[in-house]
């Protein structure tokens, strides 16, 4: 019977453990740096404010030479799916066909991945926030195409990666869960992964290791373990985001802070908001006093990297908008959004002083030159915590998630994307992790 070690119990790690327990007789040990909770709050701000569930220790910059800040990453069983905004949008059909045609990943065309999206499909609900003072209403007034966004909710309960399938895996008795236990290094015998070292100094041997520590921690762990493959830690991507914020006229007291979005698509039939999307955030603070309108670029060409300094500290430089195509489209989209929003009754949603300030910012973006808007973006852009691409298939890993030239070492998380999908990433990560674990299962059986 094989002994499989999974490093990281986030969206991908839980999916890998669940699938391996379901389709093989392997014993699986899952190491998760964070803790386990019986339930996760629906509201992402309530969920994120629980002590210890976030790892903000990795300092990043969104743009070249930009301000440095702690990146928001989950550190809890369930990972991003336990704290995120619940948005369920699979990647666009073209994303996967491009992976297949441009990156030579023949197993990842839309025809190949569509059945796997069906297998892992997260159940969703549409939640309507329609009060006169809501951001959702403001978006609906500005765009007739504003729609409720599908959310990972069933009977008002968050559907996270540590929910049903994971509990079934625990019930097999073959899944051993090691919480608050960080892996410090992968062990090798020759060119074969043979286990992991834990931060407390103990050693765990395994027939194979599947790394799911997230797109920032996975390449760092591989590098710290001595893996030196060209491209490792490069190709870092995320969706750039601008947030227009203000104090709410009426404090938000509901559970679901994101309800409506507006998709900007390259053509009307595109399966995902493949250019950009605008999201209404009824709440952007723990108290529900502030609301926001988020504008995110989904079609991303810029590439960053995870970088080790001379002192051995790791940082991530996203280099958002460093590709001229991203900058041009984002300037256009942000101006389009500002043009629509500034025409709305902002005082219906925002406190009068903040509504006036917001109106001034929006007017600036509507009336100033591309250069001025571009410079404003440099000062205000952040990302959506959708980090991806740092162990890309076709570069660092093969088309099945196996790390190049190393036996029995796999990656199954957001790092694998050769190009970030043009959608929120969680559903695609869950699909990819399940797919990779099927490849692992076939290898264990073979
Ligand atoms: C605040 C926030 C909001 C988001 N909103 C959305 C949304 O609404 N919709 C959407 O589709 N996507 C959203 N995302 C993104 C989505 O959740 C992520 O793309 C997804 O969770 C990535 O999965 P992953 O398995 O690659 O990494 P993660 O889910 O981050 O899991 C990595 C896990 O590995 C653990 N770990 C790291 N290093 C080690 C180690 N050395 N040893 C042991 N364990 C380790 C971490 O503690 C963590 O639990 C959001 C993310 C965040 C953070």
Image (cartoon, rainbow, N blue to C red):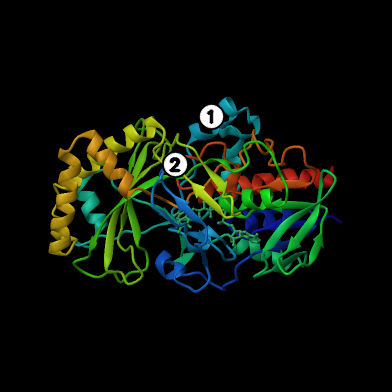
Say which mark, if any, is on residue 98.
1
Q: Residue 30 falls in which quadrant of the image?
A: bottom right
- Secondary structure under tag 2 reads loop
Residue 201 position within the rendered picture, expressed as x and y whole percent measured from the top left: 76, 67
Q: Residue 299 falls in which quadrant of the image?
A: top left
Q: Quadrant of ligand 1?
A: bottom right
- Quadrant position of the N terminus in the picture: bottom right
- Secondary structure under tag 1 reads helix
Residue 253 position within the rendered picture, expressed as x and y whole percent measured from the top left: 30, 72
At 73% across and 43% down in the image, what residue appears? 439
At 15% across and 45% down in the image, what residue appears? 363
* In-image side of 393 versus 241 (left or right): right
At 49% across and 44% down in the image, what residue appears? 90
Establish whether ligand 1 lies closer than 8 Å to the Cβ of label 2: no
Q: Nearer the viewer, residue 266 or 418?
A: 418
- In space, the residues marked 2 and 1 are separated at their CA atoms by 22 Å
Callout in the foreground (2, 1): 2
Q: Work out whether mark 2 precedes mark 1 in sequence or the reverse, and give the earlier one.
A: 1
Residue named by callout 2: 319
Local packing at callout 1 (Cα closer than 10 Å; few below 14, some 14-19, many 20+) is some
User: Compared with residue 177, is residue 92 higher up or lower down, i.e. above or below?
Assistant: above
* In-image side of 91 versus 411 (left or right): left
Residue 243 position within the rendered picture, expressed as x and y whole percent measured from the top left: 31, 52
């Amino acid at each position: 019977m094989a002994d499989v070690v999974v490093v990281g119990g986030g969206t991908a790690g839980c999916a890998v453990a669940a699938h391996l327990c379901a389709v093989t007789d392997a014993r699986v040990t899952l190491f998760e740096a964070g803790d386990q909770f019986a339930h996760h709050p629906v509201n992402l701000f309530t969920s994120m404010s629980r002590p210890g569930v976030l790892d903000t220790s990795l300092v990043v910059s969104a743009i070249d030479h930009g301000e440095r800040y702690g990146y928001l990453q989950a550190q809890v069983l369930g990972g991003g799916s336990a704290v995120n905004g619940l948005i369920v949008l699979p990647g666009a059909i073209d994303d996967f066909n491009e992976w297949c045609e441009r990156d030579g990943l023949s197993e990842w065309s839309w025809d190949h991945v569509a059945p796997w999206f069906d297998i892992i499909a997260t159940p969703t609900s549409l939640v309507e926030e329609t009060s006169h003072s809501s951001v959702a209403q403001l978006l609906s007034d500005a765009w007739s195409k504003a729609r409720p966004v599908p959310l990972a909710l069933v009977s008002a309960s968050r559907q996270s990666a540590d929910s049903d399938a994971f509990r079934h895996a625990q019930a097999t008795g073959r899944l051993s869960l090691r919480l608050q236990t960080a892996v410090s290094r992968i062990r090798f015998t020759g060119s074969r992964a043979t286990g992991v070292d834990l931060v407390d100094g103990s050693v765990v041997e395994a027939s194979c290791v599947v790394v799911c520590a997230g797109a920032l921690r996975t390449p760092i762990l591989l590098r710290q373990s001595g893996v030196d493959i060209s491209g490792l830690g490069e190709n870092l991507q995320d969706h750039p985001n601008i947030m227009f914020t203000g104090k709410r006229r009426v404090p938000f007291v509901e559970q679901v802070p994101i309800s409506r979005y507006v998709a900007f698509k390259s053509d009307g039939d595109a399966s995902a908001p493949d250019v950009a999307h605008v999201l209404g955030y009824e709440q952007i603070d723990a108290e529900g006093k502030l609301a926001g309108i988020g504008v995110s670029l989904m079609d991303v060409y810029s590439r960053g990297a995870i970088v080790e300094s001379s002192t051995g500290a790791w940082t991530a430089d996203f280099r958002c908008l460093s590709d001229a195509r991203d900058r041009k489209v984002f300037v256009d989209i942000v101006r389009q959004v500002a043009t629509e929003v500034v025409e709305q009754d902002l005082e219906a949603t925002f406190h009068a002083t903040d509504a006036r300030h917001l109106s001034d910012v929006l007017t600036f973006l509507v009336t100033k030159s591309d250069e001025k808007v571009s410079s404003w973006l440099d000062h205000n852009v952040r990302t959506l915590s959708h980090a991806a691409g740092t162990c890309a298939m076709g570069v660092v890993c093969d088309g099945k998630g196996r790390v190049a030239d190393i036996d029995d070492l796999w990656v199954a998380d957001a790092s694998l994307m050769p190009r970030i999908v043009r959608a929120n990433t969680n559903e695609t990560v869950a699909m990819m992790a399940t797919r990779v674990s099927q490849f692992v299962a076939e290898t264990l059986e073979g």
